[in-house]
Image (cartoon, helix red, strand yellow):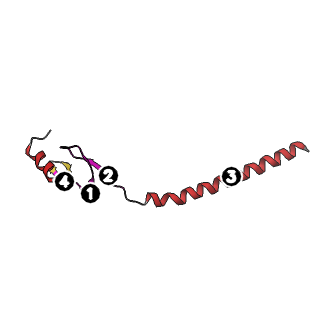
């Protein structure tokens, strides 16, 4: 009779563990879309002053097939005045 009780207790503990784990996983997945829905922007480095700036705010200079990103017009002008590295 004792092994049967242990088996039933083990089964009940396992089922309880699965229920708790399922509810915790459900709470985590419902909170995730809110944090993932915020738009993320890529940071680019200015080749002159090496400042990191959001790509959508940067000034762009296209030379050939390469695009350079700058934090200001002064950096862009300074870069355009010197030969390509």
Question: Where does label 2 land, which residue?
Answer: 42
The image shows residue 53 at horizontal and vertical percentages of 27, 51
Distance from disc 1 to disc 4, alpha carbons, whole Å, reads 10 Å
User: Which badge, 4 or 2, is on the more N-terminal residue?
Assistant: 2
The image shows residue 19 at horizontal and vertical percentages of 68, 55
For label 4, the SS is: strand
Residue 63 visible (yes or no): no
Question: Where does label 3 land, which residue?
Answer: 18
For label 3, the SS is: helix
Distance from disc 4 to disc 2, alpha carbons, whole Å, reads 14 Å
Residue 4 or 73: which is nearer the viewer?
73
Question: Where does label 4 land, which residue?
Answer: 60
The image shows residue 63 at horizontal and vertical percentages of 14, 48
Distance from disc 4 to disc 3, alpha carbons, whole Å, reads 54 Å
For residue 56, the mark is: 1
User: Which badge, 3 or 1, is on the more N-terminal residue?
Assistant: 3
At 16% from the left edge and 51% from the top edge, which residue is drawn? 62
For label 1, the SS is: helix
């Amino acid at each position: 009779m004792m092994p049967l009780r242990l088996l039933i207790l083990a089964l009940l503990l396992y089922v309880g563990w699965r229920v708790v784990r399922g509810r915790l996983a459900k709470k985590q997945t419902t909170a995730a879309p809110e944090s993932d829905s915020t738009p993320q922007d890529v940071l680019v480095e200015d080749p002159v002053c090496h400042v990191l700036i959001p790509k959508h705010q940067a000034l762009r200079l296209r030379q050939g097939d390469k695009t350079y990103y700058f934090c200001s017009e002064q950096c862009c002008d300074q870069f355009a005045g010197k030969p390509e590295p």
